[in-house]
Amino acid sequence: MATIEVSGKQIYYEIHGKGQPLMILNGIMMSTKSWHMFLEDFKDFQVILMDFIDQGQSESADTSYTHQVQVEAVLALMDYLKLENITLTGISYGAEIALQVALAEKRRLKQLIIFNGAAKTSFWLKDIGIAWQLAARTNNGNLFYHVAIPYIYSSGFYSNNEQWFKDRKNELLNVFTPDFLSRMDRLISSSESYDIISRLKEISIPVTIVSADQDFITPPHESMILIKGINDVRAIPLADCGHASMYEKPEEFVRIIKNTTVTEAL
């Protein structure tokens, strides 16, 4: 198991393949395993995956923290692996960490690709987070599933994939243990103070912003704040899609990353 130590905690990471570095950062409920379904699509890249503190195979935190802890973990892994010319992408929580990494480190980043992200934890998102936390604190995985999961997807996708969601619920109930829910509580709290709106102009590398028209967690107007604030930006809207865009639109997810990377290389 590959790990590095950051601030006294072991951070788990994986490297797959060879080629141009493509570092993918997890959404808040995800782990490195969430991306394995895409590894064959990205076989021409060197894919770097990692679990943030309180995720997957990385260690748990002892106390509360902010996004800065995760940003430092990403930077430490980039240093340790001596990565250069990196395409950094992330979804939701991972997208927000990616944006902050770009503010801290510009030399080694080639570009950002942001899926379903925001520049600030809005009042709307804070209240959604509180609902998730209250459910998590009951240690009832079934309750947490129903409070959190349906709203991550578009209603059409959810309704049209009934068996997939029944199977996924069975899988997730095995994941939503008291330890996982405790970790989720801290991860959610880490986002409470997130706000980089006033610093968006400082991001000087090319950024692709991907939004989804039925994203209830980070609605399209949140993407517009990023689009208007960042200088070198390209916007890609996804139709009939919710917050978990890589699951609802996997072909588009792969195509955007591949096409953006090729375009930037020309």
Image (cartoon, rainbow, N blue to C red):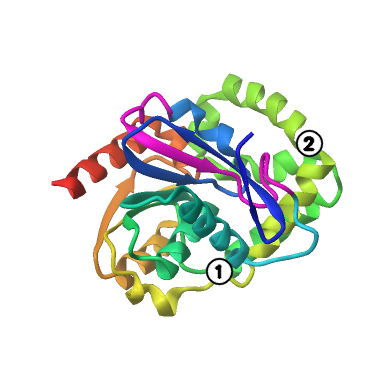
Residue type at mark 1: give it.
Answer: Ser
Mark 2 sits on what residue? Answer: 142
Q: Which residue shows up at 44% across the image and 41% down it?
A: 245
- Taking depth in this image into account, of 20 and 266 the one nearest to the observer is 20
Label 2 sits on a secondary structure element that is helix
Q: Which residue shows up at 68% across the image and 56% down it?
A: 187
Q: Is residue 8 above or below residue 40?
A: below
Residue type at mark 2: give it.
Answer: Asn
Per the rendering, the mark at residue 149 is none
Mark 1 sits on what residue? Answer: 122
The residues colored magenta run: 39-59
Label 1 sits on a secondary structure element that is loop
Circle 2: is it few (<14), some (14-19), or many (20+) Cα within 10 Å?
A: some
One can see residue 212 in this view: no
| 170 in the magenta segment | no
Q: Quadrant of the N terminus?
A: top right
